[in-house]
Amino acid sequence: MTLSHVKLKNVTKCFKDVKAVDNVNLEIKKGELFTFLGPSGCGKTTILRMIAGFYYPTEGSIYFDDKDVTYLPANRRNAAMVFQSYALFPHLSVEENVAFGLKVRKVPQKEQKEMVKRALEMVKLAGYEKRRIDQLSGGQQQRVALARALVIKPTILLLDEPLSNLDAKLREETRWEIRKLQKELGITTIYVTHDQSEAMAMSDRIAVMEGGKIQQVGTPEEIYFKPANRFVASFIGKTNFIEAVIEDFSHDSALVRVGDEIRFWVDSTCRQDGYIPYRGDRVTISIRPEAMEIVDRPGKNVVKGRVRLTEFTGVTMEYEVEMGGITLHISTPGIGKEKKSPGDEVLIHLPPRNMLIMRGDDNETA
Ligand SMILES: Nc1ncnc2c1ncn2[C@@H]1O[C@H](COP(=O)(O)OP(=O)(O)OP(=O)(O)O)[C@@H](O)[C@H]1O
Ligand SMILES: [Mg+2]
């Protein structure tokens, strides 16, 4: 199986007056699992359909391995799409469903049988050839849909929310299976989801979208620890936004002030790309709930707060803490820490390297 690399250049798609996809530029590498992540209606399916060839862009071009495929019909691109609804034929057998694309491509019967057998082995459904789709569980149907896509030996696999019909536990198991299979086959895979934890767990790289636009492209780590803006920071996991003022800034440290009294240091390198702070700037500090620590002693970057609410989840102890007139959400390990109660005064350590300084005016774009 040769793999393809995919390039989108200035791709825009309009439906009458709706700009579903707005000037997208991207390169997806060979063998990569690349995810489009974003809220409902942000344009994910539209992008996938343009890559598959079911829609043509209003503007811009799409390339597979530097070949312009923008207006090439779907059946002449070697891409296979798994739809959110699976679109299986319920009254046909597993075998007949998987063989569908081979029939369309007029592959000889004998070869078809062999190819279907191998595709079903890949998704661990050997022996289910004669079962009807309506006699399978949701997870099994999902795997039939995957086998039907894999059987044509696509160079690009397109998956549109393939796990959304499964329950939480099966979803987690299946995402591992897909990831494993994708790595084994090394197939270039473009994945769509609105579930941030699914995207984080599965992807080599993620494009975060909003309103038809790409907000950021990066590895799960880059997106989590260095979100490009407020939208990305709040869409990926939980975060606290603290409004602050820059009091001092040097090559290694920034001193920030919250309200009148609270001051702490943030590592100078921990700032939004392209932003250089100046004394007096209004900024937003983003800090993850699990980055903060409740400590026993005062010290550098230790601030005072008061517990308002607690919640024990098993894995974590969640705190809502009031600090200098603002509310912080803090998440600590559920095991081994002395539990604080509402009303308790606590000392909170803010690690200088685990915060991010963002432009104050970025708030308006969120
Ligand atoms: N065929 C169409 N005709 C008109 N508008 C459309 C069409 N398809 C999509 N849209 C609009 O384009 C925008 C993007 O839709 P799209 O289906 O790509 O979103 P999505 O990110 O896949 O959302 P979801 O997570 O809900 O599946 C939406 O505003 C949608 O209403
Ligand atoms: Mg969609």
Image: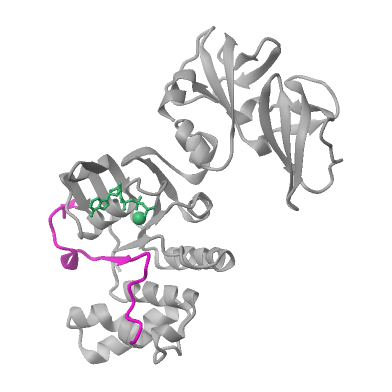
At 85% from the left and 41% from the top, the residue drawn is 339
Q: Position of residue 297 (x, y in %)?
A: 85, 25
Above or below residue 51? Residue 269 is above
Q: Is residue 60 above or below residue 93?
A: above
Q: In this rendering, is residue 142 above or below 91?
A: above
The answer to if 242 sits in the magenta stretch is: no
User: Is the stretch drawn in magenta largely helix, strand or loop?
Assistant: loop
Residue displayed at 31% across by 42% down? 212
Q: Position of residue 30 (x, y in %)?
A: 33, 55
Q: Position of residue 303 (x, y in %)?
A: 75, 21
Q: Is residue 306 left or right of residue 7?
A: right
Q: Is 159 left, or right, of 10 in this rendering?
A: right
- Image coloring type: one colour
Classify the position of ligand 2 by quadrant: top left, top right, bottom left or bottom right.
bottom left
Q: Is residue 68 magenta?
A: yes
In this rendering, position of residue 33 left or right of residue 313: left
Where does residue 89 sit, x and y in percent of width and height?
32, 80
Residue 115, visible in the rendered structure: no
Quarter of the image where the C terminus is located: top left
Q: Quadrant of residue 72?
A: bottom left
State whether residue 16 appears in this view.
Answer: yes
Disc count in the image?
Answer: 0
At x 39% / y 63%, what residue is drawn?
186
Residue at 59% across, 35% down: 239
Name the quadrant of the N terminus.
Answer: bottom left
In the image shown, does 206 or 93 lie closer to the viewer? 93
**What residue span does the magenta drawing correspond to?**
65-91
